[in-house]
Image (cartoon, helix red, strand yellow):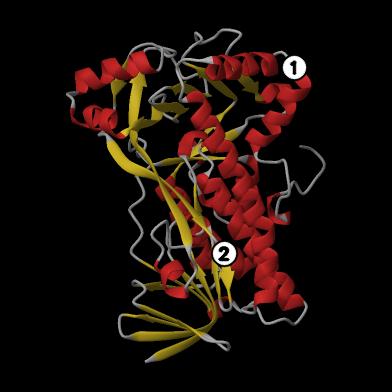
């Protein structure tokens, strides 16, 4: 049995689901000729349930992309947590001091800097939008992939799908990347990210907090029920101790690691962990195939930019395909795919380099570099012009952006 499509997307996580929803709505292609192949989506928490552990810090640019995809409007607004401030400091300086760099949405005339949203809810909202617009959802996994000059062939569960273009959105261990011959450079950070929800002695103040420690950065993100989500990146030996120690010991260590910026911390969920690696695909495209999201790039989570970069990939690819359709080009040919690659690869590499520099510099506890970086944060804090530039980056509205990520009216 075989089926014929214009586009087959592999991977129905957030980036794949958003790309599918954008393509059926914005690419100028019959939605019934766009298929999304993936495993069953995880369940979405009920309206009265506690926040799930896996969340994403959605930038303003990403919110615009999700709105264009028809997903943002489907979210339960009561479970979103806009954050109004972002505060960053090094372990060598006390919190709430001049050495802490803080961005405030009010200084930009904005209601917030972004929103914390549950990952499963974001994904499900985009999948619903994709299906509602006429896209074809197929349950299964990629078993074989063959790329030719004229078509791509995907095999799954005894069904062979023929397509003009295959989009790999299947994560850091992408089978599409491996089977298409697109190479990648993988680097182990030798760190583990611990994720959990916590209750704190003091309110989170609708603020995203991040402290840079010698053993790795710790972020506290505000959640809708007054708790906070932590992302604690720690060197492997220490991370293992944090995973295995009793709850009371973990809570004590967390309170110290956060410098008690919100007072004493108490676990409100189980602890979840995942290893941290950098992935850089040497190329994002080849004839009949394009990679987006973690299939193309994985960066350190210290600034929470992974999901945002993937959503911008989805928007840029959709725009390149829409342009090809308008100009009568073959959507699976290298020319339109290169337009997408050139725009996104430069931006993603620059972001990765910046995150690597921050992580490496702040990982030092002694010597001139951490003191210099801490002094730099304090200097930025006193410079309104420079703070505005960095705040725009935090909003995700600076640099070259896909049109779908830009404001449709005047404003920031």
Q: What secondary structure is found at the residue carrying circle 2?
A: loop
**Relative side of 261 to 5, left or right:** left
Q: Residue at the spot x=57%, y=64% of the render?
A: 283
Q: Residue at the spot x=57%, y=89% of the render?
A: 150
Q: Residues within 10 Å of mark 1 (few under 14, many from 20)?
A: few
Can you identify the residue that label 2 sits on?
Answer: 284
Disc marking residue 36:
none
Quarter of the image where the C terminus is located? top right
Q: CA distance from mark 2 to mark 1?
A: 38 Å
Report whether residue 27 is seen: no
Q: What secondary structure is found at the residue carrying circle 1?
A: loop
Q: Position of residue 216 (x, y in %)?
A: 41, 28
Q: Position of residue 223 (x, y in %)?
A: 44, 30
Query: Which is in the foreground here, disc 2 or disc 1?
Result: 2
Quarter of the image where the N terminus is located? bottom left
**Relative side of 6 to 384, left or right:** left
Q: Looking at the rendering, which quadrant does residue 252 occupy?
A: top left
Q: Which is nearer the N-term, disc 2 or disc 1?
A: 2
Judged from this view, the residue extending furthest toward the bottom is: 1
Q: 230 or 76: nearer the eye?
A: 230
Q: Position of residue 373 (x, y in %)?
A: 59, 20
For residue 80, above or below residue 124? above
Q: Position of residue 88 (x, y in %)?
A: 54, 21
Q: 391 or 83: nearer the eye?
A: 391
Report whether residue 6 is seen: yes
For residue 72, above or below residue 106? below
Q: Residue at the spot x=68%, y=29% of the render?
A: 391
**Relative side of 52 to 302, left or right:** left
Q: 109 or 362: nearer the eye?
A: 362
Can you identify the residue that label 1 sits on?
Answer: 383
């Amino acid at each position: 049995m075989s089926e014929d499509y214009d586009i087959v997307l592999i991977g129905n996580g957030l980036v794949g689901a958003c790309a599918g929803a954008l393509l059926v709505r914005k690419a100028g292609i019959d939605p019934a000729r766009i298929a999304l192949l993936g495993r069953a989506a995880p369940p979405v928490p009920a309206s009265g349930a506690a926040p799930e552990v896996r969340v994403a810090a959605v930038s303003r640019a990403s919110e615009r992309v999700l709105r264009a995809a028809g997903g943002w409007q489907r979210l339960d607004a009561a479970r979103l947590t806009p954050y109004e401030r972002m505060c960053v400091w090094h372990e060598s300086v006390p919190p709430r001091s001049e050495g802490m760099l803080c961005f405030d949405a009010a200084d930009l005339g904005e209601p917030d800097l972004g929103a914390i949203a549950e990952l499963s809810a974001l994904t499900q909202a985009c999948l619903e939008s994709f299906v509602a617009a006429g896209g074809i959802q197929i349950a299964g996994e990629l078993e074989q992939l063959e790329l030719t000059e004229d078509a791509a062939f995907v095999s799954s569960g005894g069904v062979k799908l023929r397509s003009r273009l295959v989009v790999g959105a299947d994560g850091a261990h992408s089978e599409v990347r491996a089977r298409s011959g697109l190479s990648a450079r993988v680097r182990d950070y030798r760190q583990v990210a611990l994720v959990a929800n916590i209750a704190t002695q003091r309110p989170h103040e609708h603020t995203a907090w991040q402290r840079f420690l010698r053993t790795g950065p710790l972020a506290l993100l505000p959640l809708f029920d007054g708790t906070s989500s932590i992302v604690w990146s720690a060197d492997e030996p220490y991370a293992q101790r944090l995973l295995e120690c009793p709850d009371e010991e973990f809570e004590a260590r967390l309170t110290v690691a956060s410098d008690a910026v919100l007072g004493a911390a108490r676990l409100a969920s189980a602890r979840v962990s995942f290893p941290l690696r950098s992935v850089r695909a040497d190329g994002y495209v080849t004839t009949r195939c394009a990679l987006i999201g973690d299939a193309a790039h994985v960066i350190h989570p210290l600034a929470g930019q992974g999901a945002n970069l993937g959503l911008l990939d989805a928007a840029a690819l959709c725009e390149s395909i829409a342009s090809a359709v308008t100009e009568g080009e073959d959507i699976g040919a290298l020319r339109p795919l290169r337009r997408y690659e050139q725009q996104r690869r430069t931006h993603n590499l620059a972001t990765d380099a910046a995150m690597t520099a921050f992580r490496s510099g702040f990982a030092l506890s002694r010597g001139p570099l951490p003191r210099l970086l801490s002094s730099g944060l304090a200097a930025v804090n006193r410079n309104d012009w420079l703070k505005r530039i960095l705040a725009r980056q935090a909003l995700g509205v600076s640099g070259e952006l896909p049109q779908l990520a830009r404001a449709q009216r005047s404003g920031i």
